Image (tube, rainbow, N blue to C red):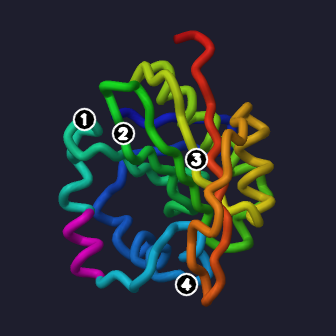
Amino acid sequence: MKTLKGKNIYIRALEPNDLEFIYAIENDQSIWEVSNTHTPYSRFLVKQYLENAHQDIYEAKQLRLAICQDQDFPAVGLVDLFDFDPKNNRAGVGIVIQGNEHRNQNIGSEALALLIEYAFSNLNLHQLFANIGTQNVASTALFTKFGFEMIGVKKEWTLINGTYKDEAIFQLLNKNF
């Protein structure tokens, strides 16, 4: 996969030197709620994951890409296609930006726009979906900005700090499909 470039950021395939960045993201308990992570990851497991990151989306059923601001700077976030279903032409979308210093700078918007374009144009997907906690105002605003519509709410879906919380499912249909 080639690098996908926007105006201020680009998204690219994962590289071996992303090990420490992914290790930090996967072990950042402040985002476990949105990433559905329950336990810490070891560097060994992250290294193994990176060694298999070369797998084609049709084989792995997922695609994780690094979000970068400049060729000289490390990744600042990750964007994912998951639950890739080529028979039904759909996939889930997830995005995370590491650190408050990188949030609210349009990085997530630009990365999501690039990923939507790639998913619809290159993978010929008919639809994308996102699972978002109903209290996650920032993610809801980001996805609805691109035309994702809430199609339902899974009641008391996730147990977070001893409390069950609702999760909404958002969907974007490819109008050109």
Disc 2 residue type?
Phe
Tell which tag, 3 or 1, sits nearer the viewer.
3
Q: Which residues are magenta?
A: 43-49
Mark linked to residue 58: 1
Instruction: Return the residue at label 3.
Output: 130
**Sequence-wise, which precedes: disc 4 or disc 2?**
4
Instruction: Return the residue at label 2.
Output: 84
**Sequence-wise, which precedes: disc 3 or disc 1?**
1
Disc 1 residue type?
Tyr
Magenta segment, principal secondary structure?
A: helix
Residue 51, percent from left and from top: 19, 61
Residue 94, percent from left and from top: 54, 52
Mark 2 is surrounded, within 10 Å at the Cα level, by few (under 14), some (14 to 19) or many (20 or more) other residues, namely many
Residue 55: quarter of image: top left
Q: Image height check: is 153 above or below 177?
A: below
Tell which tag, 4 or 3, sits nearer the viewer.
3
Disc 4 residue type?
Gln
Residue 103, percent from left and from top: 73, 63
Q: Whole-Å distance between the Cαs marked 3 and 2?
A: 12 Å
Q: Whole-Å distance between the Cαs marked 3 and 1?
A: 20 Å
Instruction: Return the residue at label 4.
Output: 29
